Amino acid sequence: MPPPRKRSPIREIADDLQGLIASGALRPGDKLPSTRDLAIKYGVGEKTIYRVISLLKAGGQLEGSQGRGVFVRGNHALEWHLTQFERGSRRDDATSGRDDWKAAAEEQGRTATQDTPRVSVEQAPSDIAAWLRVEPGTFVVARRRVRRVDGVPFQLADSWFPTDIAMNTPLMLEEDVTMPGGILANIGHPQKALRDEIRSWPPINPTEAERLELPEDVGTPVVRHIRIGYGADDQPVRVMVTVAPGHLNTLVYEMEV
């Protein structure tokens, strides 16, 4: 048998630093030693340390501050329980403006908010058209949101609707609309069934990085969660594409067997 391959110095150093973070030896907010000091400690060149830091920034363990250095990231991931989300008795509260997603985050002791939605009527890209079962280029309604946890952007949630469902309804309002049971149910198009598709899609693209206030140069890994909602006639009434940076979100499914 061939001898086992040795791990690269970059991976070894990254694993060591991750171990220090996991053990609490390096805590959220702690500043890393200088690149020079780390290079001396590990017996490598400074270029290797730069690559290690870039790797850990992309994974969400570290963050840089211009002119101050590199720090252990303080944000902890949100658990997004997808088997409960939008199912059964929803937790929407129109009085407080709390929808099902905000309620789930608040149950974890977090403060959940949402930026003012942007609404437009535009031609459906090929993937959106396929999910909505319309021809590519068909005009659809897009409702784009940035979801924040404790003030930090955690998710992009962009929903797309057929125009005959969304036009002249609260879905066209560029404001945070909350209705018990969801907007679709209140306008006569309740979702009867859901289909989830989850795709790993590194790295984040520049537009998404800007919306999520993330650096685009370190290739932050993201998960794309696609949820297609079907109406009573088994026709799609909405597709929601959520872009969830991997270091900020834990997708959870629980089911009986």
Image (cartoon, rainbow, N blue to C red):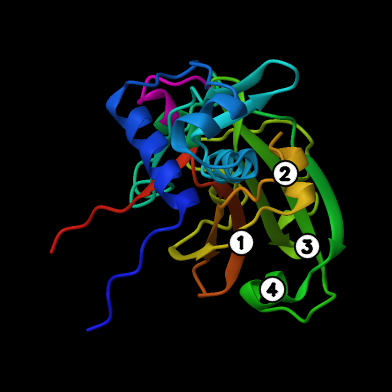
The amino acid type, in three-letter code, at marker 2 is Ala
Lower sequence index among marks 2 and 1: 2
Q: Which segment did they paint magenta?
A: 105-113
State whether residue 250 appears in this view.
no
Which of the image's four quarters has the C terminus? bottom left
Residue at label 4?
127
Give the secondary structure at mark 4: helix
Q: Is residue 74 left or right of residue 26?
A: right
Give the secondary structure at mark 2: helix
Label 2: few (<14), some or many (≥20) within 10 Å? some
The span from disc 3 to disc 4 (Cα, nearest Å) is 17 Å
Q: Depth check: 56 or 174 in front? A: 56
The amino acid type, in three-letter code, at marker 3 is Thr
Lower sequence index among marks 3 and 4: 4
Quarter of the image for residue 238 reads bottom right
Q: Are marks 2 and 3 in contact (CB under 8 Å)?
A: no
Q: Nearer the viewer, mark 2 or mark 3?
A: 2
What residue appears at the point 75 percent right and 76 percent down from the top-left corner? 126
The span from disc 1 to disc 4 (Cα, nearest Å) is 10 Å
Lower sequence index among marks 2 and 4: 4
The span from disc 2 to disc 1 (Cα, nearest Å) is 22 Å
Q: Is residue 84 left or right of residue 167?
A: left
The span from disc 3 to disc 1 (Cα, nearest Å) is 13 Å
Residue 137 drawn at (x, y percent): 85, 75
Q: Are marks 3 and 1 in contact (CB under 8 Å)?
A: no
Q: Which mark is residue 87?
A: none
